[in-house]
């Protein structure tokens, strides 16, 4: 799907889409619970569909009615020989489900699409090797197996929080207590906080300490009924239209949320006031939209950008490549990106979305100022299928070509 956007201004009210980060976690907790849970406002994006598919593969029974899921948890009584899991393009699904799957099967095979199977899993590979388990891959998928046992897990803090979350789902169900010990300072801490909060709602307790996290074994997930809160990560794209001259009010967001990307409002204020230095090491998903907003305002320097390389695309490089079509040259460093104070021009060729939903939505904001064509913009389905419908209702003019 190619989308041609005409210069136009967004104004009005819009409801934030459901938080993908929260929905993943609540669904998995429900899938591990005894009895039935109802999770409302789960959204309908591709990543959540992947998690639902994997939970069904575990043996959970899931009925979907609109955006409500009724989940009857999978039984842990019998461990089967092998299970297969299709994660589509969802990195969260893959990393969350790897430790969980080992509770249910002796051997598990994971498959995916796009860049998913290229994303690094060395943290699990090293941990599992120490625990007499394994993780290997070939052209047919990624395989994990062995008996996951409780104990001490030493992990550097500067890796994806998804590894921590995956272990936090599985370790409470093992016999014996476990510890996750941080060998370096924790990055993406807000996502770990989201996980701990979700587990607590289902009766599973993770204790923070000076070294990392203490996880008591033999815990049980207790079913419950919950609703997914609004998503600050995707709301950031809607809020960004305000820096493009718009007047948009995003409803349904919790100002006390554990979601770290709520900091977008603070970052946007700084971008409007000057040429700030913004540390995004804890908020990598905001990287693309902050780059666009910096172009629209006074420029900026983003630090802590190294993890942009291992997302759905190499986001720093991909954004820099497409910015050139607007006459904007950004400087890419090993762990920083400098966006100049400049005036973007209408691109003379289509903008490649690099199969990355956050790149597509970010350049939609810029094209609302300059005009332009987004190529293969259907990648927004990964997290926000209604994005283009919502911005049209706000007054952004476009046509699908």
Image (cartoon, rainbow, N blue to C red):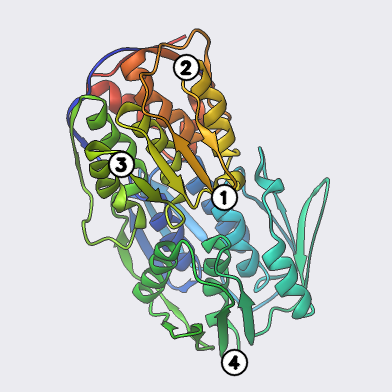
Quote the CA–CA distance across marks 2 and 1. 24 Å
Quote the CA–CA distance across marks 4 and 2. 59 Å
Residue pointed to by mark 1: 306
| SS category of the residue bearing label 4 | loop
The mark lying in front, picked from 4 and 1, is 1
231 horizontally vs 161: left or right = left
Quote the CA–CA distance across marks 3 and 4. 41 Å
Q: Which residue is drawn at 70% across and 47% down?
A: 117
For marks 4 and 1 on the same chain, the one whose residue lies earlier in the sequence: 4
Residue pointed to by mark 3: 235
Residue pointed to by mark 2: 327
Quote the CA–CA distance across marks 4 and 1. 37 Å
Asked whether residue 231 appears in the rendered view, the answer is no
Mark 2 Cα within 10 Å, few/some/many (few <14, many 20+)?
some
| SS category of the residue bearing label 2 | loop
Identify which residue, 300 or 386, lies in the foreground.
300
Quote the CA–CA distance across marks 1 and 3. 24 Å
Look at the picture and state if 318 lies above or below 80.
above
For marks 3 and 4 on the same chain, the one whose residue lies earlier in the sequence: 4
For marks 2 and 1 on the same chain, the one whose residue lies earlier in the sequence: 1
Mark 3 Cα within 10 Å, few/some/many (few <14, many 20+)?
many
């Amino acid at each position: 799907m190619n989308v041609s956007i005409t210069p136009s201004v967004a104004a009005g009210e819009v409801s934030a889409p459901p938080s993908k980060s929260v929905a993943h976690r609540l669904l998995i907790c429900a899938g591990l619970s005894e009895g039935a849970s109802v999770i409302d406002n789960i959204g309908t994006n591709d990543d959540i569909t992947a998690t639902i598919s994997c939970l069904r593969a575990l043996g959970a029974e899931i009925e979907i009615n609109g955006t409500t899921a009724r989940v009857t948890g999978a039984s842990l009584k019998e461990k089967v020989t092998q299970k297969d899991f299709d994660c589509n393009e969802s990195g969260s699904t893959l990393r969350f489900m790897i430790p969980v799957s080992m509770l249910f099967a002796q051997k598990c095979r994971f498959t995916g699409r796009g860049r998913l199977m290229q994303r690094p899993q060395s943290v699990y590979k090293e941990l599992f090797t120490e625990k007499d388990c394994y993780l290997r891959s070939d052209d047919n998928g990624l395989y994990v197996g062995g008996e996951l046992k409780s104990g001490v897990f030493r992990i550097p803090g500067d890796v994806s929080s998804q590894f921590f979350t995956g272990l936090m789902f599985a370790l409470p169900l093992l016999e014996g207590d476990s510890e996750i010990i941080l060998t370096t300072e924790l990055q993406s801490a807000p996502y770990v906080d989201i996980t701990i909060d979700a587990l607590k709602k289902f009766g599973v307790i993770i204790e923070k300490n000076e070294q990392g996290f203490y996880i008591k074994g033999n815990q049980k997930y207790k079913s419950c009924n919950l609703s997914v809160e609004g998503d600050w990560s995707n709301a950031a794209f809607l809020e960004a239209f305000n820096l493009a001259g718009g007047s948009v009010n995003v409803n349904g967001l919790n100002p006390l949320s554990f979601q770290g990307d709520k900091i977008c409002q603070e970052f946007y204020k700084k971008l409007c006031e000057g040429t700030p230095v913004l540390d995004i090491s804890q908020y990598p998903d905001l990287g693309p939209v902050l780059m666009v907003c910096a172009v629209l305002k006074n420029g900026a320097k983003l630090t802590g950008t190294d993890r942009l390389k291992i997302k759905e695309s190499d986001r720093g490089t991909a954004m820099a490549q497409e910015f050139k079509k607007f006459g904007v040259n950004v400087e890419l460093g090993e762990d920083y990106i400098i966006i100049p104070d400049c005036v973007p021009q209408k691109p003379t060729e289509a903008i490649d979305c690099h199969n990355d939903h956050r790149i597509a939505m970010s350049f939609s904001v810029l094209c609302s100022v300059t005009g332009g064509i987004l190529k293969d913009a259907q990648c927004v389905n990964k997290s926000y299928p209604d994005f283009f419908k919502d911005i049209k209702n706000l007054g952004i003019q476009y046509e699908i070509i």
